Image: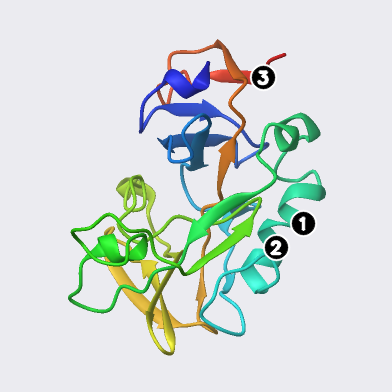
Amino acid sequence: LLSTRYSGEYISFGTGENNLYRIVSHENGTGTKITSAIPLKDSGNYKTMSFGSNLTFSKDNTIGTFLNGDYLTNGAHLTSDQVNMIEDNTTWYLGTVGRGTNYKLSKYQDTTSGSLTTATTTAKVGLLRLGELMAGQFDKDDNNTTYWTLTPSTTSSVCYVFYEGQGGNDSVVGVHGSRPSMNLKSNVIITGGKGTAQEPFTIKLGS
């Protein structure tokens, strides 16, 4: 089962130039959260877009509409078999992390109690939170783009990841890349590979 594997390992997932993903965590317990190894590309260039019309990520805002629409359905990013591996409804945590505050606030109400934030949304595909595993991991030898996170920063801006991997914030109408994130179903199995960038795991949906 893919759910027995570890954060950071690589998976052959996606199509064309967007065919490498990494394990983030097992946040939903039985499945496997993954994200694209690098921000999405389009004909060799990083694909960028605005976040939306407000600070709250949803499947209906600009970037959410793309991730839960064209990204899933047009065949340019995922095969139909891969789409079927993804959980239909994942809870995404939308806690605010202001400048100088703890990244744990992106998921929790405070930094000590473990109480989850009440700011959430449900969607099939989302983005990583600021400070989440893999949110700053990127091949710096070829890193010339920034990418959005789910995390609001102020009443008028959302956090993104800067060139060198640190966090920044920008207006929702700013333009940055995206690293789709999703939970794969608990019965996804490994069919080959070693989990490295050179030999990523190959996977399929088990019975």
Residues marked 2 and 1 touching at CB (< 8 Å): yes
Name the residue beneath numbered marker 3: 204
In this view, 157 is above or below 160: below
Instruction: Determine whether the residue tagged by mark 3 lies in a helix, strand or loop.
Output: strand
Instruction: Determine whether the residue tagged by mark 2 lies in a helix, strand or loop.
Output: helix
Measure how far apart labels 2 and 1 are at the Cα level: 5 Å
Instruction: Determine whether the residue tagged by mark 1 lies in a helix, strand or loop.
Output: helix
Which residue is pictured at 60% across the width and 42% down the height?
A: 18
Residue 82 in the image: state x and y as whole percent. Answer: 71, 32
Residue 185 in the image: state x and y as whole percent. Answer: 62, 30
Neighbor class of circle 1 (other Cα within 10 Å; few <14, some 14-19, many 20+) is few
Residue 78 vs residue 137: left or right?
Answer: right
Mark 1: amino acid: Asp
Dot 2 or dot 3, earlier in sequence: 2
Dot 1 or dot 3, earlier in sequence: 1
Mark 3: amino acid: Lys
Question: Is there any visible trace of residue 71 in the rendered image?
Answer: yes
As drawn, the label of residue 70 is 1
Which residue is pictured at 46% across the width and 18% down the height?
A: 199
